[in-house]
Image (spheres, rainbow, N blue to C red):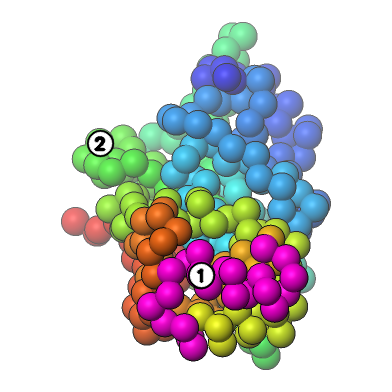
Amino acid sequence: MGSKRFTPAKLDRFDREGRGTGAYEGYVPYHQVRRGDPSSLGRSHLLVLDDRIRELLSDGELGTQYFVLMLLGLDDSLEQYRLDLVSHPHALAAYYERDTAVLYPGTLQLAEELGMKHPMVHGGGDSAPWRATTDFVVILRLPRQPRKLIAVAFKPSGCLERRRTRELLCLEREFWLRQGEEWLLITPDQFDKRVRLTLCRTAAWALDDQVSAEERQLAKAIVNRRQGDSLTELLDVIAGELHSLRRAQAALWQAVWKGELPVDLRRGWRPYAALDHISEEDFWSLNPIASRRSAWTST
């Protein structure tokens, strides 16, 4: 478990380490599952994906990461993203899609404009502005379209009831709105817990070595042809075609996570239960990020 106490010296060290900067496999999360970093509510997780370790500070962040990984056109996903204190280029400048000469206000200026006290840290006789972060910055790139950014904060239910927490979320939200980007506040109230549990149970196969499009289509055809069969029966048939149960699991769940095989993710864990087919619209509505649900209200 890491330390909860931040000091100006610790923040200086984080800056020297380049935390909260970079893109793709070169990105370095600002907060990490390390000794000397903040402990978080619940369990922390390390997820190896795309040649980089993902630093997830709670079960809630793990579930949110899975929702992110389902998104169509996902180009990059940055967790524990540092918000600049002073004027800065657009966040997409790291992907060569914004003019670095155009600057946007940092959190110090925004806090003043919003009439709130900027958070500070103290220690060793010094004081320094706190570095706010966004839990996830999601980069989407669809064919023949420029990259799009969605900033996502995951917080516990009831977080908006606390005045200071709401102020800090307002500051984070304004940081992204000034750049012309979306910001979503996700709490457990924005999704069905059963969906998150299904994603956690199937992630090992969905994030395994990626199978071919032909193998996913084979799994989809078998599932569609044998509606009403149990999950066990379906996997036996797919495994017979692919000569591997692991390959069958990967083909089926990768097709599901990509939305090619829309089934109801609110299912239980029992393998003798059938896969229930639903429409694509209903399938994507189960993902709070894909459907752009947010707990934030302006009142």
Amino acid beneath label 2: Arg
Q: Is residue 162 left or right of residue 61?
A: left
Q: Quadrant of residue 14?
A: top right
Which residue is pictured at 60% across the width and 49% down the height? Answer: 79
Q: Name which residue lies at 28% across and 53% down.
A: 189
x and y percentages locating residue 124 in the rendered image: 62, 9
Query: Residue type at mark 1?
Result: Glu
Judged from the image, the secondary structure of the residue bearing numbered disc 1 is helix
Residue 41 found in image quarter: top left
In magenta, the rendered stretch is 224-245
Image-based side of 145 in relation to 187, left or right = right
Would you say residue 278 is visible in this rendering? yes
Residue 36 vertical placement versus 144 (above, below): above
| Disc assigned to residue 162 | 2
Left or right: where does residue 100 sit relative to residue 190? right
Distance of label 2 from label 1 (alpha carbons): 50 Å
Residue at 57%, 41% in the rendered image: 56
Residue 203, percent from left and from top: 58, 55
| Quarter of the rendering occupied by the N terminus | top right
Q: Is residue 225 magenta?
A: yes
Residue projecting furthest to the top: 124
Q: Which label number is shown at residue 233?
A: 1
Going from N to C along the chain, the mark reached first, 2 or 1, is: 2
